[in-house]
Image (cartoon, helix red, strand yellow):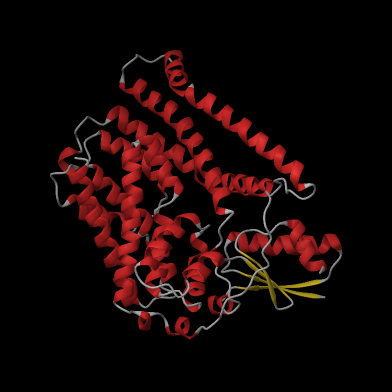
């Protein structure tokens, strides 16, 4: 079970990012628990400057713009 | 999102994509050069009298719509490729700890080159300030990023002229530099919301991977599908309104209201522009038509800057991190800059 946090104030891209992570996880057969972090202070505490951001098991792997499907799969498998 | 993702065999794939890009560019130039004959030809096909108001409106619409959309696609693509070299995190690292002055100039220029979306404004603001980017430098970035954007510049260049586009670029940057510098001089950090001051996040190190040329071209295509996909309706709507003004509003009707002799029109349009929220794409075609009908160019540019840079929705977002006093300073400083630019433009291009 991977713990995934999607950081973003709730804009469309952030929602899309969460959906992409879920889809990628389903495709490669990894169990994920996705949590959306929308609080600005909480987002900032991860040290990113652009959203959406992706945190997997406490580690920031992506910030700013939609991630690539292949990258998500790579992060989840790592 | 079914856009192609470059993965394997990066080198041959890059060569192929560069070739395709050059071919597309050649095709673009060929089509673009045929737009005037095309619009004339369309008008002759229609059952309207040549030279009539209706014919003029249609010609304006048929010529400007493809022209502006083609320019947009080209420039947004180019900026998408350029921006693949930048990210807010890299920009922040460049700006952290910069002194006032040089920091404001750098921040304003990076504001043009860094990918920015207004939904990201607050996280970016906090991310910058908490990582040691001075407040005034952060403001220079935040003012330049939405105001001096490629969509505005393309439309000004395509519809009004290169000299106005260049002047807009220069004065937009100047407003961002000077406003940020002034806000920095006042040392207003204590007017941030208390919870923002308390964040000491530090900086995350993201894994960086060098992109291939194919991936950068891909970034350009993503930018086109994203930005042009969002603004094309506004462009067409704006040009349609502009076409009606072009064909039907009598020449010089606006000279007395928005002309350069009406000194009060500059502050009036700035105040009017604040609650309006539009993007450059929708507003510039209307501006082109207004200028034709006698509105002074500084007045309409001040209006446009106020609409884009001082929008109410953005202020509501910023209110989350700024106290009302700091927000008021921001509006006052940027508003004065826009007024100054309005008067200056009227004097220069009158």
Q: Where B324 sits versus B10, above or below?
A: below
Depth check: B168 or B283 in front?
Answer: B168
- Is there any visible trace of residue B103 in the rendered image? yes
Is B277 in front, or is B284?
A: B284
> Nearest the camera: A1 or B169?
B169
Judged left or right of residue B151, residue B186 is: left
Q: Farthest residue toward the right?
A: A29
Q: Residue B112 in the image: x percent, y percent?
A: 45, 55
Can you tell which quarter of the image residue A50 is in?
bottom right
Question: Is residue B82 depicted above or below B329 in this figure?
Answer: above
Looking at this view, is B257 or B99 the one in front? B99
**Residue B283 in picture, x, y percent from top left:** 37, 45
Is A63 on the left-hand or right-hand side of B30?
right
Q: Residue visible at 55% across and 53% down?
A: B83
Instruction: Say which residue appears at 54% left-offset and 75% top-offset.
Output: A40
Task: Specify whether B207 is left or right of A78.
Answer: left
Residue B110: percent from left, percent from top: 46, 59
Residue B82 at what x, y percent from top left? 55, 50
Count the labels in the image.
0
Q: For the point 41% across and 75% down, which residue is it? A: B134
The quadrant of the rendering that contains the C terminus of chain A is bottom right
- The reply to whether residue B228 is visible in this rendering is no
Q: Quadrant of the N terminus of chain A?
A: bottom right
């Amino acid at each position: 079970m991977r713990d995934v946090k999607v950081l973003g104030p709730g804009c469309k891209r952030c929602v899309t990012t969460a959906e992409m992570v879920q889809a990628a996880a389903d495709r490669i057969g990894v169990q994920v628990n996705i949590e959306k972090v929308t609080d600005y202070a909480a987002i900032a505490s991860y040290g990113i400057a652009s959203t959406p951001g992706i945190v997997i098991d406490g580690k920031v792997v992506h910030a700013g713009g939609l991630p690539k499907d292949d990258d998500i799969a790579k992060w989840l498998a790592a | 999102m079914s856009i192609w993702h470059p993965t394997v065999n990066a080198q041959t794939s890059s060569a192929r994509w560069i070739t395709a890009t050059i071919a597309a560019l050649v095709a673009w130039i060929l089509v673009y050069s045929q737009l005037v004959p095309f619009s004339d030809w369309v008008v002759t096909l229609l059952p309207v009298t040549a030279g009539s108001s209706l014919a003029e409106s249609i010609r304006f619409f048929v010529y400007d719509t493809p022209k502006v959309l083609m320019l947009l696609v080209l420039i947004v693509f180019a900026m998408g490729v350029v921006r693949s070299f930048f990210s807010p995190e890299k920009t922040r690292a460049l700006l952290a700890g910069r002194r006032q002055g040089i920091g404001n100039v750098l921040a304003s220029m990076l504001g043009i080159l860094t990918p920015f979306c207004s939904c990201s404004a607050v996280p970016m603001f906090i991310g910058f300030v908490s990582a040691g980017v001075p407040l005034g430098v952060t403001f220079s970035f935040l003012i330049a990023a939405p105001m001096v954007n490629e969509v505005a510049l393309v439309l000004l260049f395509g519809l009004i002229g290169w000299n106005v586009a260049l002047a807009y670029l220069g004065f937009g940057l100047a407003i961002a530099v000077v406003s940020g510098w002034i806000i920095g001089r006042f040392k207003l950090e204590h007017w941030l919301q208390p919870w923002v001051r308390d964040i000491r996040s530090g900086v995350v190190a993201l894994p960086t991977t060098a992109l291939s040329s194919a991936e950068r071209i891909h970034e350009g295509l993503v930018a086109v599908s994203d930005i042009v996909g969002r603004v094309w309706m506004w462009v067409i709507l704006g040009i349609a309104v502009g076409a009606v003004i072009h064909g039907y509003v009598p020449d010089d009707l606006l000279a007395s209201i928005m002309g350069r002799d009406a000194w009060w029109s500059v502050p009036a349009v700035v105040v009017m522009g604040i609650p309006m929220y539009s993007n450059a794409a929708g507003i510039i075609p209307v501006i082109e038509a207004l200028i034709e009908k006698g509105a002074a160019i500084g007045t309409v540019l001040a209006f446009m800057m106020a609409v884009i840079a001082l929008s109410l929705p953005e202020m509501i977002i910023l209110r989350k991190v700024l106290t009302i006093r700091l927000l008021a300073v921001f509006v006052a400083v940027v508003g004065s800059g826009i007024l100054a630019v309005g008067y200056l433009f009227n004097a220069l291009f009158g």
